[in-house]
Amino acid sequence: MIEPRHADQSRADEGRAAEATRRLRAAELRPTRQRIALCRLLFSPGDRHVTAEALHDEAVRAGVRVSLATVYNTLHQFTAAGLLRQVVVDGSRTYFDTNTKTHHHFFREAEGELIDIPGDQIAVSGLPASPEGTQIARVDVIVRLSSARS
């Protein structure tokens, strides 16, 4: 007999898997076992910023058998499908953001942490005209933070 707590957990797990499958299908991505697992990890806790390495570590701790290359590929597929936004902090740091609404970021340099800034709290003006045949897709503002000195 399954204990009630285990049955509740099993139903919750099934619900999260079903939600991940729905999200992937809506983005026109095939819901493979690894995509479902990574989708569940990414979107279960709410809006967050992750690196591929951090997501890979989280997946391994959760018992998901997936390579770092697969995590990278999946994050890029999710980004291309509109499920994530890619935030390039510098040439060596790229984060993937589950919040795809218009917003900007604070970046705590010492901690390597991104913090959302609502889109309506920053006004960007004076942008140059985009080159012929192109249009501005979005403007990303990253405000870099360091520790305050006394």
Image (cartoon, rainbow, N blue to C red):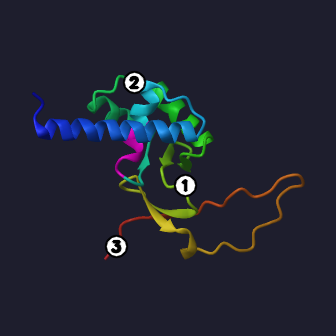
Locate residue 133, reporting x and y percent: 88, 52
Residue 44 visible in this rendered orientation of the protein: yes
Q: For the N terminus, which image quadrant?
A: top left
The residue located at (49%, 55%) in the rendering is 99
Residue 53 visible in this rendered orientation of the protein: no
Locate residue 61, reporting x and y percent: 27, 32
Question: Residue tagged by mark 2?
Answer: 66
Q: Is 11 inside the magenta-drawn segment?
A: no
The residue located at (32%, 36%) in the rendering is 14
Foreground residue among 117 and 127? 117
Where residue 100 is drawn, which disc sits there? Answer: 1
Q: Is 40 inside the magenta-drawn segment?
A: yes
CA gap, disc 2 to disc 1?
Answer: 25 Å
Q: For the C terminus, which image quadrant?
A: bottom left
Amino acid type at circle 1 is Thr
Instruction: Give the vertical position of 88 relative to 14 (above or below).
Output: below
* Callout 3 secondary element: loop
Do the CB atoms of the residues marked 2 and 1 lie less than 8 Å apart? Answer: no
Foreground residue among 107 and 16? 16
- Magenta span: 39-45
* Callout 2 secondary element: loop
Question: Residue tagged by mark 3?
Answer: 149
The residue located at (61%, 60%) in the rendering is 140
CA gap, disc 2 to disc 3?
Answer: 43 Å
Where residue 127 is drawn, which disc sits there? Answer: none
Mark toward the viewer: 3 or 1 = 1
Locate residue 29, reporting x and y percent: 57, 33
Q: Report whether 86 appears left or right of 139.
A: left
Amino acid type at circle 3 is Arg
Do the CB atoms of the residues marked 2 and 3 lie less than 8 Å apart? Answer: no
Residue most toward the right?
A: 132
CA gap, disc 3 to disc 1?
Answer: 34 Å
